[in-house]
Amino acid sequence: MTQRIKALLVHFLTATGAVFAMLAMLAAVDEKWSLMFLWLMVAFVVDGIDGPLARHYHVKKHAPEYDGVLLDLIIDYLTYVFIPAFALFKSGLLNGWTGWVCLIVITFTSVIYFADTRMKTKDNSFSGFPGCWNMFVLVMFATTPHWLVIFGLVVVIAISMFLPLKFIHPMRTERWRMISLPVTILWTGLSGYAAWHNFNISHATIILFAITSIYIAFAGIAQQIFPEKTA
């Protein structure tokens, strides 16, 4: 198998995210939330492995006619933003007008953020919340807080997208990666478990879910508060 074919296969792997997005959307339209999240988790896993594969097989060199970054952003907007926003709106977790506000805030701020060329930091983290609304909405489905809490969190998180706060990339942020990567894998497993069981999970699982979510959300900010010591 030539290097070009390998590079093209990586692009095609990334493109499968669009198929999983459509399957998730079909499930969401029927309000089959568990199935929707399971498809989103499959897309999430693909998104986690296609980047390292793209760098390993040098897709920019061997298949430059396809823009892998653009392809990734299109699919990420569908799976990270558009479908989760729809699910939050239709789920009944929000009350009246707050659903409309959250739907507009999530989709509008995220598309602006995705187009921002300053979204990446020097250590391959994200500057501002990286629009991972799929993770947020899944946690809301699992924990079902009061609608005022969800509304408040959406507003705060949307604002944080445009603040100089660092959010880690579990695979590309080298600092604390030995912790961040296993925690993210655990979070992914817990998410799949919660969705598979229609979010009927034990309090212990919810607590573990909350701990891993808090780590992923605040590890980058902690790194800003406690910067690495330079020699």
Image (cartoon, rainbow, N blue to C red):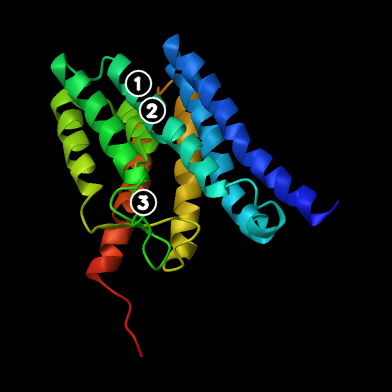
Disc with the residue nearer the chain's start (3 vs 1): 1
Q: Which residue is drawn at 28% across and 74% down?
A: 227
Locate the C terminus and report the quarter of the image it occupies: bottom left
Disc with the residue nearer the chain's start (2 vs 3): 2
> Measured from the top left, where is residue 101 in percent x and y?
18, 24
Task: Please say if 174 is above or below 10.
Answer: below
Q: Residue 95 occupies which quadrant of the picture?
A: top left
Label 1 sits on residue: 86
Q: Which amino acid does label 1 sit on?
A: Phe
> Measured from the top left, where is residue 140 in percent x and y?
30, 30
* Left or right of 73 in this view: 111: left
Label 2 sits on residue: 82
Q: Which amino acid does label 3 sit on?
A: Ile
* Left or right of 89 in this view: 62: right
Q: Do the residues labelled 1 and 2 touch (CB within 8 Å)?
A: yes
Q: Which residue is drawn at 84% across and 54% down?
A: 2
Label 3 sits on residue: 216
Tag shown at residue 74: none
